Amino acid sequence: GAVVSQHPSRVICKSGTSVKIECRSLDFQATTMFWYRQFPKKSLMLMATSNEGSKATYEQGVEKDKFLINHASLTLSTLTVTSAHPEDSSFYICSARRLAGGPMFNEQFFGPGTRLTVL
Amino acid sequence: EDKVVQSPLSLVVHEGDTVTLNCSYEVTNFRSLLWYKQEKKAPTFLFMLTSSGIEKKSGRLSSILDKKELFSILNITATQTGDSAVYLCAVDGLNTGTASKLTFGTGTRLQVTL
């Protein structure tokens, strides 16, 4: 159990276009999903926390108008990179936290990641 | 701001060697410390530590936490080439009034050679 999928696994796009990445919890319900970004040879940096049915909470320095997050159901969150630029090229990873256990429980299950390349 | 520092940044060892990876942290409202292994894709969970002095063990891997010194180590004995990966340390810090979140260290890149 506790499988998280991401789609697409890899995307290449032109500068100025928008890209949507999906994160799904396949066999459990997730009230909270997290979006991370990882640059080459760097660690995961939390971008935002996404709660089902409410607005996402963004980390300092992350532009909410550029990285749109929608968490419309207990199994799906989407990240849209709007007007992508080459500096947005990175590895984007989501994680999902189980509904069971309440808000104090923080076991996160990670998706396989999406590699975005903006030309 | 929560902070996690790992050392060394990278390490090359021969198969069969034992390695110790270090993680120190500063965090408000500490809840747990987690170790992950990352190969080419997303991190895979290794250990979650919440109490000082209690060793967690899984095969050749073990880890322990010192909450007084704000420090954890991950040991790998009899290393194999399949252990080559980036090992990430993360701390779960509970923010007042909100759900907790993970702060990751920069990772230790381990390469095991034949």
Image: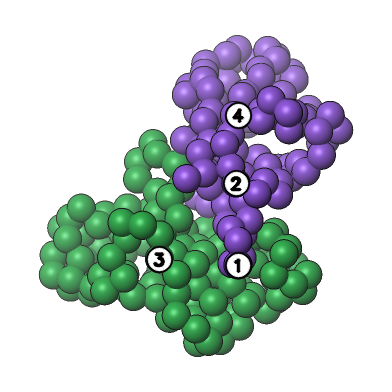
Chain colours: A green, B purple
Q: Is residue A55 visible?
A: yes
Earlier residue among tags 1 and 2: 2
Q: Secondary structure at mark 2?
A: loop
Earlier residue among tags 2 and 4: 4
Residue B48 in which image quadrant: top right
Give the alpha-carbon distance from disc 2 to disc 4, as whole Å.
16 Å
In the displayed structure image, the side of residue B68 where residue B58 appears, left or right: right
In the image, which disc is placed on residue A58? Answer: 3
Within 10 Å of disc 1 (Cα), the crowding (few <14, some 14-19, many 20+) is few
Q: Amino acid at mark 1?
A: Gly
The structure residue drawn at horizontal position 53% and vertical position 51%, both measured from the top left corner, is B42
Q: Between residues A110 and A8, which one lies in front from this camera angle?
A: A110
Within 10 Å of disc 4 (Cα), the crowding (few <14, some 14-19, many 20+) is many
Q: Amino acid at mark 2?
A: Thr
Residues at discs 4 and 3 both on one chain: no
The residue that label 4 is drawn on is B23
Front disc: 1 or 3: 1
Front disc: 3 or 2: 2
Q: Amino acid at mark 4?
A: Cys
